[in-house]
Image (cartoon, coloured by chain):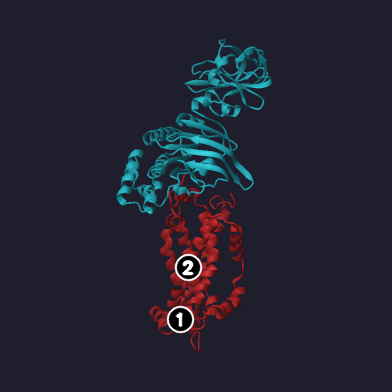
């Protein structure tokens, strides 16, 4: 077995591993911990340069309320929700249907369309910046509205999601679909009643992934949106920078608030990740 | 009426012809088994009848109606798959009633049919379980129940017992036999296991490489195979094939066996030159009695209790299998005398076609 499992490795290797592992975990979590700690500091602490020591005062309530009172953070979070939820729903709906078609219908050009989906994933999104912006201003005039980000994210995320769903649906036994056809079920009925319940774990996993991608997206929030009443939270954090000084404690608190929803979504969707849903459908 | 007629049915996948012109009549209420080695096209033929594949050429009719452009759901067929194909997220009851519910059948009608299927297949205790909570045999009964509830004209079984263990296979085989007696429906059953074919069928269709080799009742195929392929396929253990020299003599063929013995087979008018003698292991006996004798050296003994399989080599090289009594004392290395009768021998020409069949039946 390669690499050698750690229980079987030599004593020196094991010792190095047991030392290196906690050290790397600490390093990994340090930035997160630092941000969390900073969000609890008062401004005096930061001015004094006390970045790593214990805060002189725990300003939890002050800082976190200030985030909401001193900037339109509530509006930004609402904007993020208004953009992310429809985009996730749209991307999942389209990719389920496209993935099913690519996986189970042998139409002419199936492989070609599939390879276009795969190839599209390799396009660096930065090069799309100007074309998409021009599209949103000139062709479909939705620049600086919710629709700009919703439609863009649906289009962009569907690429990856279709690839994922197609591979997942491909593993479902053909006999299930044929059995449905023999029973007189229409294609849509088969899709809705047989395929979708069986791909629930995949949809749940994708929902979390896509939610996280779209919620945390910073680039397109900058490119496609100008006004505060449409701006999502990622781009909106800058408004916490303050006129004369950078209020790091507020920015940290705002970042933590902005980062919480994807984590919440992950925990909510966990029970849908149950694998082995197709146990018992067919032999083995 | 649910008779099935196939006329010159062909199926091509791209350039490859899988089914090469099949003509077949299956009467209403008959239990017909398609049997053959892997890759012979039996499952493809079944899927053509079901409508899951389109016929490239020829015609198929069920109950007198031409089926070439009829969708699978409207053909009056129901299929039981090798892999059961149960919907894993539904209970047994929901699985069985799913098609009827989607077709918006009246609720009491659905309940009646589900109850009837459940009684017939003893599914009562499992109705609220999911497929993952059932054993293989139980899942297969649910799959059969799902087919029964459709009240189809023709039942199609695609190797339904292949995934069951040996004991369960026998039990489920008997249940399917009883089902056929109860429902008196036309059933087409695909298997590669010739024991299943022999025990269940009214009519067996032996397929090889997309063509029908022979159609007939089990005993007819056993005693009067039309060619060497059918002779070797039907019957377990397999028939012995011994290369011999044949000559036309008075009253039939004169055969020279390995070791020099002569055998006279009545009936073969055109036997000449190299031929193959076929005789089943159960028709060979140890000892001197019989129309002809062979001498052989035993290489291997398999003691099954009820019988002993002796694998021996004749003088000159050909190997034979003899089914001897369970208590026989022969050991590997012994020289034995094998007796055979003309009535149980078949003769095949160089191309594999039958020249003479045995006359036991």
Q: Mark 2 lies on which chain?
A: A
Q: Where is residue B208 in the image (x, y as percent from the top left)?
A: 58, 35
Q: Position of residue A92 (x, y in %)?
A: 48, 64
- Total numbered labels placed on residues in the image: 2
In terms of sequence position, does the residue under pointer 2 or pointer 1 come before the other?
2
Q: Position of residue B169 (x, y in %)?
A: 44, 34
Query: Residue pushed farthest bottom?
Result: A244
Res B9 visible:
yes
Q: Which chain carries label 1?
A: A
Query: Residue pushed farthest top?
Result: B288
Considering the numbered disc 1 on the image, is that residue within a helix, a strand or a loop? Answer: helix
What is the letter of the cyan chain?
Answer: B
Viewer-proximal residue, B107 or A151?
A: B107
- Do circles 2 and 1 both sit on a common chain? yes
Res A39 visible:
no
Q: Mark 2 points at which residue?
A: A90
The mark found on residue A74 in the picture is none
Residue B50, relative to residue B240: is it above or below? below
Q: Position of residue A175 (x, y in %)?
A: 48, 48
- Crowding around mark 1 (Cα neighbors within 10 Å: few <14, some 14 to 19, many 20+) is many
Q: Mark 1 points at which residue?
A: A250
Q: What's the residue at 41%, 37% (across, down)?
A: B185
Considering the numbered disc 2 on the image, is that residue within a helix, a strand or a loop? Answer: helix
Query: Residue pushed farthest left?
Result: B108
Q: What's the residue at 52%, 25% (across, down)?
A: B222
Tint of chain A? red
| Image quarter of the N terminus of chain B | top left
Q: Quadrant of residue A70?
A: bottom left
């Amino acid at each position: 077995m390669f690499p050698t499992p750690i229980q079987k490795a030599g004593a020196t290797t094991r010792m190095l591993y047991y030392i290196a592992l906690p050290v790397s975990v600490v390093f990994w979590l340090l930035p997160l911990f630092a941000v969390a700690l900073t969000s609890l500091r008062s401004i005096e602490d930061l001015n004094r340069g006390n970045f790593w020591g214990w805060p002189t005062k725990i300003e939890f309530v002050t800082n976190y309320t200030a985030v909401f009172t001193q900037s339109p953070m509530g509006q930004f979070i609402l904007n993020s929700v208004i953009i992310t939820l429809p985009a996730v729903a749209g991307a999942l709906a389209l990719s389920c249907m496209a993935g099913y078609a690519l996986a189970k219908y042998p139409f002419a050009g199936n492989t070609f369309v599939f390879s276009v989906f795969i190839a599209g994933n390799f396009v660096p999104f930065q090069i799309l910046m100007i074309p998409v912006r021009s599209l949103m201003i000139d062709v479909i005039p939705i620049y600086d509205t919710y629709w700009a980000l919703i439609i863009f994210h649906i289009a962009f995320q569907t690429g990856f999601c279709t690839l994922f769903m197609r591979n997942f649906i491909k593993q479902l036994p053909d006999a299930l679909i044929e059995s449905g056809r023999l029973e007189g079920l229409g294609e849509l009925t088969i899709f809705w009643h047989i395929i979708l319940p069986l791909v629930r774990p995949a949809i749940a996993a994708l929902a979390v992934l896509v939610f996280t991608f779209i919620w945390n997206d910073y680039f397109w929030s900058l490119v496609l949106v100008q006004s505060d009443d449409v701006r999502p939270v990622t781009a909106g954090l800058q408004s916490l920078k303050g006129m004369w000084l950078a209020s790091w404690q507020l920015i940290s608190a705002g970042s933590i608030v902005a980062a919480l929803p994807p984590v919440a979504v992950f925990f909510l969707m966990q029970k849908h990740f149950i694998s082995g849903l197709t146990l018992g459908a067919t032999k083995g | 009426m649910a008779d099935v007629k196939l006329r010159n049915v062909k199926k091509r996948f791209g350039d490859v012809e899988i089914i090469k012109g099949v003509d077949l009549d299956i009467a209403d209420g008959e239990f017909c088994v398609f049997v053959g080695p892997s890759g012979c096209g039996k499952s493809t033929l079944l899927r053509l009848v079901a409508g899951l594949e389109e016929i490239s050429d020829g015609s198929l009719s069920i109950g007198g109606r031409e089926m070439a452009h009829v969708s699978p759901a409207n053909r009056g067929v129901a299929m039981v798959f090798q892999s059961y194909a149960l919907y894993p997220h539904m209970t047994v009851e929901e699985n069985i009633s799913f098609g009827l519910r989607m077709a918006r059948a009246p609720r009491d009608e659905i309940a009646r049919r589900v109850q009837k299927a459940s009684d017939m297949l003893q599914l009562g205790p499992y109705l609220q379980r999911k497929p993952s909570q059932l054993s293989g045999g139980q899942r297969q009964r649910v799959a059969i129940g799902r087919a029964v509830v459709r009240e189809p004209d023709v039942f199609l079984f695609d190797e339904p017992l292949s995934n069951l263990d040996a004991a369960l296979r026998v039990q489920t085989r008997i249940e399917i036999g009883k089902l056929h007696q109860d429902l008196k429906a036309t059933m087409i059953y695909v298997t590669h296991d010739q024991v299943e074919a022999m025990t269940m069928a009214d009519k067996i269709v032996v397929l090889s490489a997309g063509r029908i080799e022979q159609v007939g009742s089990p005993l007819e195929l056993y005693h009067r195979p039309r060619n060497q392929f059918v002779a070797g396929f039907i019957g377990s253990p397999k028939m012995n094939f011994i290369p011999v020299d044949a000559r036309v003599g008075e009253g039939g063929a004169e055969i020279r066996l390995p070791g020099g013995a002569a055998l006279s087979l009545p009936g073969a008018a055109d036997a000449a030159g190299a031929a193959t003698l076929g005789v089943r292991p159960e028709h060979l006996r140890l000892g001197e009695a019989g129309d002809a004798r062979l001498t052989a050296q035993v290489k291997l003994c398999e003691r099954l209790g009820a019988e002993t399989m002796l694998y021996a080599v004749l003088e000159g090289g050909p190997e034979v299998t003899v089914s001897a009594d369970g208590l026989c004392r022969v050991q590997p290395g012994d020289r034995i005398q094998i007796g055979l009768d003309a009535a149980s021998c078949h003769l095949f020409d160089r191309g594999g076609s039958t020249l003479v069949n045995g006359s036991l039946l």
